[in-house]
């Protein structure tokens, strides 16, 4: 970097702005995690102080884990998220490959049609989806959720991935064709590894809304068997009494898997977002 | 062994006609270069031969067999791409062997062929490396090796040297020429660089706007171009074209190559002033603004001192002056 852009006030200013933003962004998360380790009195007495030996209490976590089914809710959330993610990435990538690689009549129209879902929230169709699930006997199954989330994630996936797949060198695909590779092998072995960063981007953008969703689990799968974590946490939110310890502990735990997946994907993610801009 | 016949091949992308009826015959063992400005259809023609694009009409015949409906892998061809197009996840060895493996060749035979190809291209030390660990020149050698191990009827090269730097380009050009001499295989080579075309080809096919302008040996094209386009495209610096009327000639255009003009400070056919001089050591390019002929280029062998603004007389060699008619064709 040249010295002209590195004057001290500029550096201090930039860092001050970034640090302020970081503090604002992290504040609620830290508040939740901090208070989850405090007793009820501690939470209400001094919500903004970190747990002291006096207020430290694991009652929230013991309640959540003692509630028994919470592990099961976690499992449900994980199954739904991972399965939906898998299908979104698989079908999204395949559709994107077809759109970017093959010339056929109505190609760009098809691309627009598939991208339409980005602009229309899937929740508008909730009633129809519920009727559909009732008719096909899928209410209160994880399958229902996986189907809905796959549909919800596909438009953005197709849109982003087809842009990236257009950048994969034609020569490479043609070399594969001359060497006798099938179109499937070309797709899975040559193209997919090259668009991995953009797959990670899509994965993160798809995963977080699914993990955090309350709407569809509440409507399509509210049974004890199929509850997800976000729905399960509602258990502690009563009309008259709210078990804040348990809710904060449940939320803290719910952050973990997303955080872990995010860390796994983040290195790829940064490359995905900046590729093209910085070569 | 490896003959190719192209019969009236046409290719259109929607309403845009890229190839407007190409007829061409390549005999076994020939090195044929397709040359032309960008957008002339040379790469498309190569892709049609490879089977990567379907022609709109016409036939492609390899070794007497109509392959118009055969997939690329079954045509008995191998292709080298401008961007190398190596498989990034495979080692050099596996890159070269993949095509044979797909075709079900026994492992021992694959090993044998990779051995021959890698020693031919001095790739032995790199066999276990991945493409990312190789330099540009090495990558292109691997791409050539990948073509060699397939022992194809037809080698197709799509601007293989365009991504290499100047020094490497000369070396790799030499290597391709040696390879052709050694394998005696039929090779088709696409380039926009006329130096590559002149140095490598047995036969040059000059393409322009989807049509073949002329087919012939390098010297044939240089000495007797069929029309104005070929005359301007072959040779560097470009041939000078002068309006016939200004010189009092009956021909529409008069063409003289820069190297077929002589200059003299005292007398000559065309009086002009030096606009710019390029000193290359081995030769000197002078740009003269002539009263009669307009701006022309003169190439003088060796060093020639000429200051911009100086007055010089240029004289064309009458035996090496070309006359073109209104349709661009050479007048005999």
Image (spheres, helix red, strand yellow):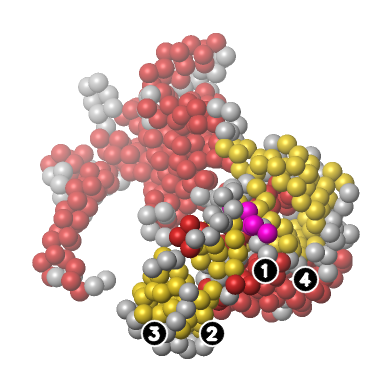
The region drawn magenta spans: B328-332
**What residue is pinned by disc 1?**
B223
* B72 and B49: which is toward the camera: B49
User: Callout 1: helix, strand or loop?
Assistant: helix
When asked about the image quadrant of residue A217, the answer is: top left
Mark 3 or 4: in front is: 3
Q: Earlier in the sequence, mark 1 or mark 2?
A: 1
User: Are labels 3 and 1 on one chain?
Assistant: yes
* B164 and A88: which is toward the camera: B164
CA separation in Å, label 3 and label 1: 29 Å
* Residue A122 shows in the view: yes
CA separation in Å, label 1 and label 2: 19 Å
Is the residue under label 3 in contact with that under label 2 (CB below 8 Å)? Answer: no
Q: Farthest residue in the left direction?
A: A9
- Residue B13 percent across, percent down from the top left: 60, 37
* A158 and A44: which is toward the camera: A158
User: Callout 4: helix, strand or loop?
Assistant: helix
When asked about the image quadrant of residue B141, the answer is: bottom right
| Main SS of residues in magenta | loop
Q: Is residue B167 left or right of residue A152?
A: right
Task: Reply above or below: A4 against B73.
Answer: below
**What residue is pinned by disc 2?**
B301
Is the residue under label 2 in contact with that under label 4 (CB below 8 Å)? Answer: no
CA separation in Å, label 4 and label 2: 32 Å
**What residue is pinned by disc 3?**
B306
């Amino acid at each position: 970097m040249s010295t002209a852009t590195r004057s001290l006030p500029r550096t201090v200013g930039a860092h001050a702005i970034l640090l302020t933003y970081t503090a604002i962004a992290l504040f609620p998360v830290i508040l939740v995690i901090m208070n989850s380790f405090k007793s009820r009195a501690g939470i209400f007495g001094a919500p903004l102080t970190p747990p002291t030996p006096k207020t430290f209490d694991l009652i929230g976590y013991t309640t959540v884990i003692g509630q028994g089914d919470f592990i099961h809710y976690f499992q449900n959330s994980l199954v739904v998220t991972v399965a939906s993610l898998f299908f979104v990435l698989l079908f999204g990538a395949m559709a994107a490959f077809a759109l970017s690689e093959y010339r056929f009549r109505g190609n760009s129209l098809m691309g627009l049609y598939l991208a339409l879902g980005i602009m229309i929230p899937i929740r508008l169709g909730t009633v129809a989806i519920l009727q559909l699930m009732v008719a096909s006997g899928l209410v209160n199954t994880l399958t229902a959720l996986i189907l809905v989330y796959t549909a919800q994630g596909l438009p953005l996936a197709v849109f982003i991935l087809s842009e990236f797949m257009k950048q994969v060198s034609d020569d490479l695909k043609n070399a594969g064709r001359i060497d006798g590779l099938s179109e499937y092998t070309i797709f899975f072995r040559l193209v997919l590894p090259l668009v991995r960063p953009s797959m990670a981007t899509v994965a993160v953008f798809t995963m977080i809304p699914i993990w955090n969703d309350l709407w569809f689990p509440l409507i399509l799968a509210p049974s004890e068997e199929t509850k997800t974590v976000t729905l399960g946490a509602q258990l502690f939110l009563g009309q008259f009494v709210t078990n804040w310890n348990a809710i904060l502990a449940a939320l803290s735990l719910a952050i973990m898997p997303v955080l872990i997946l995010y860390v796994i994907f983040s290195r790829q993610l940064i490359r995905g977002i900046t590729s093209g801009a910085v070569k | 062994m490896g003959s190719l016949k192209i019969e009236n091949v046409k290719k259109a992308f929607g309403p845009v006609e890229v190839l407007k009826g190409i007829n061409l015959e390549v005999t076994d063992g020939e090195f044929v270069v397709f040359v032309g400005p960008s957008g002339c259809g040379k790469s498309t023609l190569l892709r049609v031969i490879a089977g990567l694009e379907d022609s709109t009409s016409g036939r492609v015949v390899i070794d007497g067999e109509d392959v118009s409906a055969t997939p690329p892998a079954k045509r008995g061809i191998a292709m080298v791409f401008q961007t190398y197009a190596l498989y990034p996840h495979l080692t050099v060895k596996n890159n070269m062997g993949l095509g044979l493996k797909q075709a079900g060749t026994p492992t021992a035979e694959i090993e044998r062929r990779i051995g021959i190809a890698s020693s031919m291209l001095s790739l032995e030390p790199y066999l276990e490396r991945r493409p990312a660990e190789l330099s540009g020149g090495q990558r292109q050698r691997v791409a050539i090796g990948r073509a060699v191990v397939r022992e194809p009827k037809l080698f197709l090269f799509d601007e293989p040297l365009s991504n290499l730097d100047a020094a490497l380009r000369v070396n790799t050009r030499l290597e391709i020429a040696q390879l052709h001499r050694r394998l005696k295989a039929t090779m088709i080579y696409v380039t926009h660089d006329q130096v590559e075309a002149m140095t490598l080809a047995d036969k040059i096919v000059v393409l322009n706007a989807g049509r073949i302008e002329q087919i012939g040996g390098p010297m044939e094209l240089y000495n007797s171009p069929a029309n104005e386009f070929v005359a301007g495209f072959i040779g560097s610096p470009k041939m000078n074209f002068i309006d016939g009327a200004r010189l009092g000639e009956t021909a529409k255009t008069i063409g003289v190559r820069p190297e077929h003009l002589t200059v003299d400070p005292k007398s000559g056919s065309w009086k002009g002033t030096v606009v710019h001089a390029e000193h290359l050591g081995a030769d000197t390019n002078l740009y003269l603004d002539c009263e009669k002929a307009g701006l022309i280029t003169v190439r003088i062998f060796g060093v020639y001192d000429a200051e911009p603004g100086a007055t010089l007389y240029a004289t064309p060699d009458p035996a090496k002056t070309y006359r073109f008619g209104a349709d661009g064709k050479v007048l005999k």
